[in-house]
Amino acid sequence: MSDDVTTPGARASRRAAKPRRRRRGLKITLGVLLVLLLAAGGTAYWLFNRLDSNIKGVDIDQALGEDRPEKLPTSGQNLLVLGSDSRAGAENQELGGGGSIGGARSDTALVVHIPEGRSKAVAVSIPRDTLVTRPECATDGGSAMPAKERVMFNSVYAQAGPACVVKTVEKMSGVRIDHYLEINFAGFKDLVDAIGGVTVDVPQDIDDKASGLHLTAGPQKLDGTESLAYVRTRHGIGDGSDLGRIGLQQQFLIALLSEVKSQDLLGSPASSYRIANSATKSLTTDSGLASLTSLAEFARSMNGVDPASMETIMLPVAYDKADPNRVVAAEPQAGQLWKAIREDTAIPEEAKKSPATGG
């Protein structure tokens, strides 16, 4: 995750990066499912309503209208997951480095595609520094915002809100987004702390004076604050760009979901509630998922996903010719990638190769 819209993006490093495969299922909502098992008596009713009221909903369908890609002809689903750097609230301001930066940006963006059959999934990371064409959108306040070319992807959230981010992704990919999930700084930190920290295998020494993150290579157990710094560090890894840290974000998410899955939540109702509370209190979803019942149903539909078959790739990008600190979608790779997702078919190996790697 990053600090502001104007932070320099991709620089001139071209060293090949290892492709990263594997994904754990979207099991963060496991805590929600387990809380439902406690639904007996007044205390459970209070807990359910407290968790249910945590979730904020956005009516994406109403905001976007009918001018959208067609739904998949299969039962496949596409989910847009955003990590927001919102400074709203004292905790978010402190975690974001103070309140001097207004608004919020989509620091981390993943298009998660779950093919028909729900036995595997792929997550596509969209680099925040990617130059895109923002379509005409209605802002959160209801005013019209004209279309504009060559805007940074992560600025769309700040300028027009989540519905416009969904519309931008749909326009650039031709992929219909079925659901939307967003979590902010505080929610991420609290979730990690609720599960007792996450152990990651740090690939190299990290000495990031900007964030204050100092780690030696090797296995390290990180608390919530350290974990947030880890997934946001730019200066401590690769060429200092957003591209370099995408690998860290992917690695961390695998470790996070593995930790949630490994804990005996059925044997510890208190832990189940604590994790579910952390996972929902800073969560914003589309209106179709904005309740515990809907989230639980969606999580149940993901039970068949085989973690070993899940894959995460970065949207193929190339350094922009006019501004080497920015990237653009690389063709024909990006087009091949989106086509495979639209048609719910296997992604060609060529479509996973990015000319710009971030070192």
Image (spheres, grey):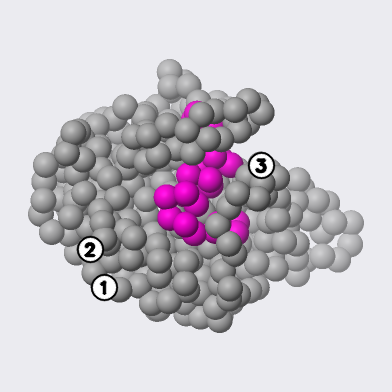
**Can you give x and y, in whole percent of width and height, for residue 200 in the image?**
32, 59
Residue sitting at x 56%, y 69%: 72
Please provide the residue range marked out in magenta.
Answer: 158-179
Residue 324 position by quadrant = top left
Amino acid type shown at disc 3? Ala
Residue nearer the viewer, 96 or 163: 163
Mark 2 Cα shell of 10 Å, populated few (<14), some (14-19), many (≥20): many
Amino acid marked by disc 1:
Glu
Q: Which element carries disc 1, helix, strand or loop?
A: helix
Q: Classify mark 3: helix, strand or loop.
A: helix
Residue plotted at (75% across, 51% down): 52
Height in image: 53 above or below 261? above
Q: Residue furthest right?
A: 42
Is residue 171 highlighted in magenta?
Answer: yes
Q: Main secondary structure of the magenta part?
A: helix
Is residue 134 something that shows in the picture? yes
Residue 353, numbered label: 2
Q: Are marks 1 and 2 in contact (CB under 8 Å)?
A: yes
Residue 252: x, y in percent? 37, 57
Front: mark 3 or 2: 3
Q: Measuring 31% from the left and 70% from the top, which residue is drawn there?
A: 21
The numbered disc on residue 63 is: 3
Please name the residue that numbered disc 1 is placed on: 349
